[in-house]
Image: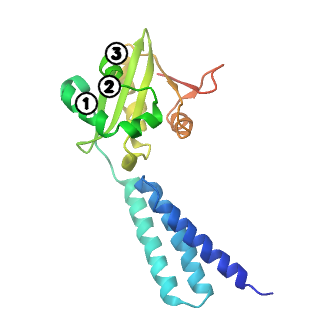
Amino acid sequence: MNFDWIKEGIGYAASLIILVSLLMTNVFRLRVINGIGSVLFGAYGWLIGSWPVCVINLVIAGIDGWYLLQTLTSGAFFDLAPAASVGPEYLRRFFLFHERELKKYAPELTLEELQDSCTCLIFRNLLPVGLFSYRRNGPDAQIVIDFMIPEYRDFKAGRYLYRTKRMFFKEQGIKRFVATARHPSQPKYYLKNGFVRAAGAPDGFVNEL
C-alpha cells in the first residue's frame, strides 16, 4: 500500500494546526495547540526521513510542554480591589481599553452600569487582569461581568473568585451568584467553577454559596 497520501495528510494537518495556534490570544491555548502541531510535524519529518524537521519540531513540542507545566504548577497571587479604592479614572481607562473585548461577554455593558454596581478589579501578581461586577438583589448577586483579559484565561481567577473568596462574599450576606451566559465560552467556565444550570433558563447559571 502506498502511504504517501497519509504522510502528506499528516504534514498538511500539522501545518494547519500550527497556523491555528498562532491565531490564539490565550497563551495557554496557544501552547497546547502549537505543541500538538509540533508533535505531528515531528512525526511527518520522521516519516519522510527528514531528521532536521523531526528533531526541531520535537524540541518545540518539548518547550511548549515545559511552559504548560510551569503554568499549571506555578502559584499566582490574586487580589480583588473594589473599583472605588482604585479610583473612577482607573476604572474608566480599563473599560475603554478593553471595551471591545468586554462587550463580547456583556454586549449591553456600559461604564455607568459598572459604576452603579459592585465592581472590582482583579489583580494577578499585582497586574490588573480582570473585572468582576455584580448587582445585589437581597441574598442574590446578579453577575454583570466576570472578565479576564485573553492572556490570563486559565480558570485560576475563577477558582479564586468562587472558591478562595467564597467566605468573603458570604460574610457580605450573599447566598448565591446568578449569571447569564452571553458568550459560547461562558457555560464551560461557569460549570467548571461550581455553577449549575438554572431551572427554566437555558442560559442561566446559579452558584449556591
Classify 201 as above or below 93.
Answer: above
208 or 42: nearer the viewer: 42
Q: Nearer the viewer, mark 3 or mark 2?
A: 2
Q: How far across and how far down the image is residue 86, in percent? A: 19, 29
Mark 1 crowd level (few <14, some 14–19, many ≥20, 10 Å Cα): some
Asked if marks 2 and 1 touch (Cβ < 8 Å), the reply is yes
Q: Secondary structure at mark 3?
A: loop
Amino acid type of the residue that numbered disc 1 sits on in the rendered structure: Arg
Q: How far across and how far down the image is residue 114, in percent? A: 33, 23
Labels 3 and 2: the sequence-earlier one: 2
Amino acid type of the residue that numbered disc 3 sits on in the rendered structure: Gln
Labels 2 and 1: the sequence-earlier one: 1
Amino acid type of the residue that numbered disc 2 sits on in the rendered structure: Leu
Please indicate whether residue 201 sits to the left or right of residue 101 in the image.
right
> What residue is drawn where x is 21% and y is 25%?
88
Q: CA distance from mark 3 to mark 2?
A: 24 Å
Asked if marks 3 and 2 touch (Cβ < 8 Å), the reply is no
> What residue is drawn where x is 59% and y is 81%?
44
Q: Secondary structure at mark 2?
A: helix
* Residue lying at the far right of the rendered structure: 1
Q: CA distance from mark 3 to mark 1?
A: 26 Å
Labels 3 and 1: the sequence-earlier one: 1
Instruction: Provide the residue designation for mark 2.
Output: 111
Instruction: Provide the residue designation for mark 1.
Output: 92
Mark 3 crowd level (few <14, some 14–19, many ≥20, 10 Å Cα): few
Classify 17 as above or below 1.
Answer: above
68 or 22: nearer the viewer: 22
Instruction: Provide the residue designation for mark 3.
Output: 172
